[in-house]
Image (cartoon, helix red, strand yellow):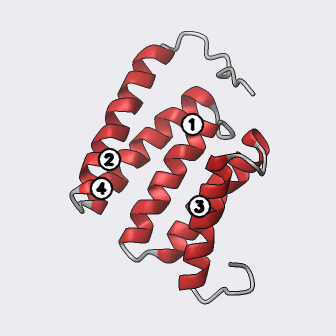
Amino acid sequence: STFAPPDRAGSSLGDGDQRVKQLIDEGHENFRKGNYQRALKVWSEAHEIRERLLGPEHPDTARVLNAIGNAHNKMGQDAQALDFYSRALSIREQALGPGHPDTARALSNLGIVRHKLGQLDEA
């Protein structure tokens, strides 16, 4: 399905979207280099902007939440990773449906962290 951004009178979606893309790219670059703290910082900023521009239930917002979960996961912050993965999964289930590959990826990430936390019944 297609998502229209919420009406934001006076805001420039294009400029904000460009900034989000730059932040996401910067986050991926830092993540690849193992600089998870920096990736987390820039992805958090990207999330703030994306949520403001597209809303909290948009699949692109979920994508950033998942990336933030990845950074927490790599830093061994499993409870935080679980929270972000859960939020991403919830959005993706609602917006994309249970059979979408992005939903499956979020469910897999959630299962991995739940397994690490010993939540085997839920993993």
Q: CA distance from mark 4 to mark 3?
A: 17 Å
Q: Which residue is mark 1?
A: 60
Q: Quadrant of residue 117?
A: bottom right
Q: Amino acid at mark 3?
A: Tyr
Q: Quadrant of residue 58?
A: top right
Work out whether mark 2 precedes mark 3 in sequence or the reverse, and give the earlier one.
Answer: 2
Q: Is the residue marked by circle 4 packed among few (<14), some (14-19), or many (20+) residues within 10 Å?
A: some
Q: CA distance from mark 1 to mark 4?
A: 19 Å
Instruction: Classify mark 1: helix, strand or loop.
Output: helix
Work out whether mark 1 precedes mark 4 in sequence or the reverse, and give the earlier one.
Answer: 4
Q: CA distance from mark 2 to mark 4?
A: 6 Å
Q: Which residue is mark 4?
A: 31
Q: Amino acid at mark 2?
A: Gly
Residue at 40 percent across and 77 percent down: it is 76
Q: Are marks 2 and 4 in contact (CB under 8 Å)?
A: yes
Q: Quadrant of residue 53?
A: top right
Query: How far from the left and from the top, in percent, is residue 52?
Result: 56, 31
Q: Is the residue marked by circle 1 packed among few (<14), some (14-19), or many (20+) residues within 10 Å?
A: some
Q: CA distance from mark 1 to mark 2?
A: 15 Å
Q: Amino acid at mark 4?
A: Phe
Instruction: Classify mark 2: helix, strand or loop.
Output: helix
Work out whether mark 1 precedes mark 3 in sequence or the reverse, and give the earlier one.
Answer: 1
Q: CA distance from mark 1 to mark 3?
A: 14 Å
Would you place residue 70 above or below residue 94 in this image? below
Q: Are marks 1 and 2 in contact (CB under 8 Å)?
A: no
Q: Which residue is mark 3?
A: 85
Residue at 59 percent across and 61 percent down: it is 85
Residue at 40 percent across and 17 percent down: it is 15
Q: CA distance from mark 2 to mark 3?
A: 17 Å
Residue at 43 percent across and 23 percent down: it is 16
Work out whether mark 1 precedes mark 2 in sequence or the reverse, and give the earlier one.
Answer: 2
Q: Which residue is mark 2?
A: 27
